[in-house]
Image (cartoon, rainbow, N blue to C red):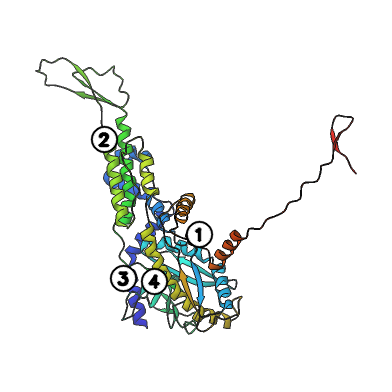
């Protein structure tokens, strides 16, 4: 095992550039884009020019908007139904979903998936209740010894803080610690590969007997356990606001003309509004002094069209159909680019994600129900002592991922289809409310067929208002 630990740590060190790249993308997702744009511009401009463009940098975070638009599959709650089980199994399953706030947590995990192409989620207990946490992609490493499918992780390495040690000279040094999970063991190791004694688990045994149930891993790649980082995500996220900042910089100087003079005595000339350039002709030339003006010109519309084209091509490369934009000009630049992003169609991409997450969830629930939960019950560490039926499994169904439309538009379209006889009212209600269970749907249909009429008694005659001697109003008391 010690040889394998050293091999895992060695590969984790080689993976460090990707972890750093992921850390930078996480900073951008959290809103810290400006420093990356400034770093990019510092490499292209002189120090003096950078100081001029710095106040006009446009840190517009397109990545955050794109990730928000593509990470919607858990915002319409999927149905999780017990198969080959009992009503009590379903109640226990629903308790798990509620206690873990599962849809909210996996929505965050789905955002990581759309940023990094993978998503790792971990189950744990807190105050005798099950919880789940999406692990950010800058702080985990996976390894596989699976000879059949190398995209299935067999070891999970997570950071576990630091330890202070003495080096050979007696100096204090920090040593990184990691927690290494496998089907058989859970160990604490240092960055040299040495196993650290753990009083809570001295033998380093995995009491659950499997990684399945402890972790849920979703991977876009069919070839790599940890896919290579995209070359476009970071670059395009920074490049688009850089181009907008370039445009702001150009517009700044387009607003001012540059005056120039030939053979002019400039001692009494005010150099305004921005600059005055002096030229001298050859002393022997017989020429009169001359004043002129240079007006910088930038084709703003062409630059905007370039930005829009590059943004559209980038979205298409991510399986996203951008919204339609035409006749962009300086006047409608912001609204046009905003429309392109707001109206992009992510339904195809979200449908693929729903299929991946459905399969990953079902496998994960199998391990959680039959490996993790029984151990917690045996240790009296979880509130619910009930066990799942031995053959019970979970079937996860996501609503059909439709293009993002306003509810009113969907209602009108479905109404037209029902009136034309293309679909039934029941089918229309399912499409309008995909998160409803069959029970809820039947209840609503029954309420529509047999509406409850409330009989309201007429209001009692109010007491007469009598004016008092001071002109005020008081209610009579019977």
Distance Cα–Cα, label 2 vs label 4: 65 Å
Q: Looking at the rendered structure, which numbered label has been put on residue 367?
A: none
Q: Looking at the rendered structure, which numbered label has been put on residue 222?
A: 3
Q: Which residue is at a point 53% across and 63% down the rendered structure image?
A: 436
Q: Looking at the rendered structure, which numbered label has been put on residue 425?
A: 1
Q: Looking at the rendered structure, which numbered label has been put on residue 169?
A: 4
Of badges 2 and 4, the one in the foreground is 2
Q: Is residue 388 visible?
A: yes
How many residues crowd mark 2 within 10 Å: few (<14), some (14–19), many (20+)? Answer: few
Classify mark 1: helix, strand or loop.
helix
Of badges 4 and 3, the one in the foreground is 3
The first of marks 1 and 4 along the sequence is 4
Of badges 1 and 4, the one in the foreground is 1
Q: Which residue is mark 2?
A: 299
How many residues crowd mark 4 within 10 Å: few (<14), some (14–19), many (20+)? Answer: few
Cβ atoms at labels 3 and 2 below 8 Å apart: no
Cβ atoms at labels 2 and 4 below 8 Å apart: no
Q: Position of residue 105 (x, y in %)?
A: 49, 64
In this rendering, would 373 be left or right of 465?
A: left
How many residues crowd mark 3 within 10 Å: few (<14), some (14–19), many (20+)? Answer: few
Q: How many marks?
A: 4
In this rendering, would 311 be left or right of 207?
A: left
Q: Position of residue 333 (x, y in %)?
A: 35, 39
């Amino acid at each position: 095992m010690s040889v394998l630990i050293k091999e895992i740590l060695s590969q984790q060190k080689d993976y460090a550039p990707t972890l750093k790249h992921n850390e930078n993308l996480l900073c951008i997702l959290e809103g810290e884009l400006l420093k990356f744009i400034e770093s990019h511009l510092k490499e292209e401009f002189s120090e003096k020019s950078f100081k001029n463009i710095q106040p006009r940098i446009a840190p517009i975070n397109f990545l955050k908007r794109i990730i928000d638009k593509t990470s919607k599959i858990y915002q319409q709650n999927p149905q999780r139904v017990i198969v080959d089980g009992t009503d009590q199994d379903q109640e226990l399953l629903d308790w798990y979903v509620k206690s873990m706030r599962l849809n909210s947590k996996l929505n965050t995990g789905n955002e990581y998936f759309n940023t990094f192409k993978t998503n790792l989620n971990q189950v744990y207990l807190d105050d005798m209740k099950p919880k789940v946490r999406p692990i950010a992609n800058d702080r985990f490493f996976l390894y596989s010894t699976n000879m059949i499918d190398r995209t299935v992780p067999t070891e999970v390495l997570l950071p576990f803080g630091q330890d202070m040690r003495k080096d050979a000279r007696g100096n204090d040094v920090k040593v990184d610690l990691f927690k290494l999970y496998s089907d058989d063991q859970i160990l604490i190791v240092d960055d040299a590969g040495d196993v650290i004694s753990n009083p809570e688990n001295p033998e380093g045994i995995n009491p659950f007997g499997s990684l399945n149930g402890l972790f849920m891993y979703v991977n876009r790649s069919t070839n790599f356990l940890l896919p290579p980082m995209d070359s476009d995500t970071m670059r395009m996220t920074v490049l688009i606001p850089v181009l907008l900042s370039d445009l702001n910089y150009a517009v700044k100087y387009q607003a001012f003309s540059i005056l120039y003079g030939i053979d002019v005595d400039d001692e009494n000339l005010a150099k305004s509004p921005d600059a005055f350039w002096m030229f001298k002709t050859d002393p022997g030339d017989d020429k009169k002094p001359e004043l002129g003006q240079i007006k910088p010109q930038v084709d703003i519309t062409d630059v905007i069209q370039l930005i829009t084209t590059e943004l559209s091509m980038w979205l298409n490369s991510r399986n996203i159909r951008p919204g339609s934009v035409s006749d962009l000009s300086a006047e409608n630049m912001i609204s046009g680019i905003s429309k392109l992003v707001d109206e992009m169609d992510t339904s195809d991409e979200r449908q693929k994600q729903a299929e991946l997450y459905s399969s990953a969830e079902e496998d994960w629930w199998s391990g959680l129900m039959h490996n993790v939960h029984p151990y917690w019950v045996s240790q009296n560490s979880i509130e619910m002592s009930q066990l799942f039926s031995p053959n019970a499994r979970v079937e996860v169904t996501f609503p059909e991922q439709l293009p993002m439309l306003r509810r009113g538009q969907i209602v009108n379209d479905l109404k037209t289809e029902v009136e034309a006889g293309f679909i039934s009212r029941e089918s229309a209600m399912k499409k309008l409310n995909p998160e409803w269970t069959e029970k809820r749907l039947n209840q609503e249909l029954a309420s529509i067929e047999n509406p409850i009429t409330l009989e309201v008694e007429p209001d009692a005659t109010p007491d007469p208002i009598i004016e008092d001697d001071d002109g005020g109003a008081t209610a009579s008391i019977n």
